[in-house]
Amino acid sequence: MNNSKDIGQNGETITLNYLLNKNYFLLEKNYHSRYGEIDIIVENEKYIVFVEVKTRNSRSISRGVESVDRKKREKIIKTAFEYILKNETDKQPRFDVSEILVDFQNRFKSINYFENAFDLEEYSEIF
């Protein structure tokens, strides 16, 4: 793994395996809309979950979860709304962030998984 795209894809694979081990079912990976991309879309009995994956070196100054700013969250929400319009569901949407930490050789160190990292409440004006 030499470039950031490879590192990011590795983080997505680690996150997906983490979710599958917690009995989630994969719906989409790298779902694109005119608004942006959602890294992983999974579901369980209760939720449809839209997951943003951020992979960082464990010595990075900033945390991955911090890089999911208001503008990025808005893109994710709009993309999720488009997905739900095309793929009807009665499940509650949830927005999670997965922070993957790797060492200097880009080997997996740990995962910090944030369920319900943000919600729709502060974004009601976009609908």
Image: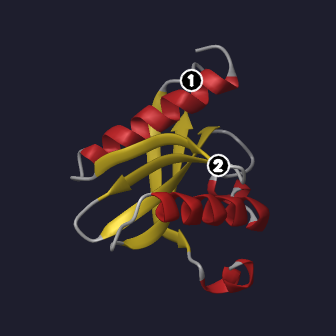
Residue 30 in the image: above or below residue 24: above
Q: What quarter of the picture does the C terminus occupy?
A: bottom right
Color theme of the render: secondary structure
> Picture coordinates of residue 89 (x, y %)?
36, 67
Specify few, some or many for label 1: CA neighbours under 10 Å numbering under 14, 14-19, or 20 or more.
Answer: many
> Picture coordinates of residue 17 (x, y %)?
32, 38
Residue 36 in the image: above or below residue 82: above
Mark 2 falls on what kind of element?
Answer: loop
Which residue is more in the foreground, 4 or 71? 71
Q: CA distance from mark 2 to mark 1?
A: 30 Å
Is residue 5 visible in this depiction of the protein? Answer: yes
Residue identified by numbered label 1: 106
Which residue is more in the foreground, 119 or 27? 27
- The image's mark for residue 33 is 2
Mark 1: amino acid: Asn
Residue at image point 65% right, 64% down: 78
Which residue is more in the foreground, 65 or 105? 65
In the rendered structure, which disc, 2 or 1, sits on the residue that comes first in sequence? 2
> Picture coordinates of residue 5 (x, y %)?
65, 25
Mark 1 falls on what kind of element?
Answer: loop
Which residue is more in the foreground, 121 or 55? 121
Residue 74 appears in which quarter of the rendering? bottom right
Is residue 103 visible in this depiction of the protein? Answer: no
Residue 53 in the image: above or below residue 71: above
Residue 91 appears in which quarter of the rendering? bottom left
